[in-house]
Image (cartoon, helix red, strand yellow):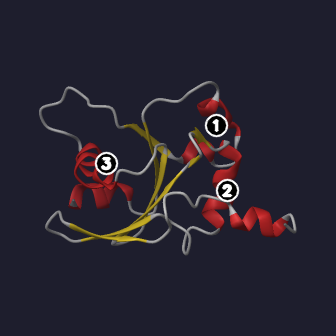
Amino acid sequence: MERFRNRYTGRSLIVHQGFTGDWLEELLKQPGGGGHFRIDSRPLPRRRPSPVEWLVQTHILPLELPQPLFLDMREDTLLVRHLTRGEHAVHPSEIAWFLEELDTRHHARLTLSGDGTAQVQYVLPVTDNEALSMLEHLGL
């Protein structure tokens, strides 16, 4: 856990199971889109997982949220929001709107301890993934 926190605090990750179509290409076109670390959550043939692989396998996948997922690593907290609506990934341009409201609108909050455990608090229902800040800006 400590190795993960040292490397990723203040950073964001996108956990996925591969990208369909031109989703990754569109992500990289977005302001800051190339700055998100990306990790494929499909099983990797490793005896000893890297710190981020360990975190994903141990704490993120058991949440059973649809993928791709956006993870924002704070000091002792990891905020998780899935990036799907219905059965499809949202357009990468919506990530900016999700970031604007991430403090209050996330699907899970993991409070990390030094011993490798995490307390999970679910915030939004899985079915709620509208970008409310976008709708407010559009006057809807």
Q: Residue at x 20, y 26 (%)?
A: 45
Give the percent coordinates (x, y) of residue 38. Answer: 45, 40
Q: In front of the other: label 3 or label 2?
A: 3
Q: Which residue is mark 3?
A: 61
Q: Which residue is mark 2?
A: 96
Placement of the C terminus among the 4 image quadrants: bottom right
Q: Amino acid at mark 3?
A: Leu
Give the percent coordinates (x, y) of residue 112. Answer: 27, 69
Q: In front of the other: label 1 or label 2?
A: 2
**Is the residue marked by circle 1 packed among few (<14), some (14-19), or many (20+) residues within 10 Å?**
some
- The quadrant holding residue 91 is top right
Q: In front of the other: label 1 or label 3?
A: 3
Q: Amino acid at mark 1?
A: Leu
- Would residue 132 appear left or right of 40 to someone viewing this image? right
What is the C-alpha distance between the residues marked 1 and 3?
25 Å
Q: Nearer the viewer, residue 12 or 59?
A: 59
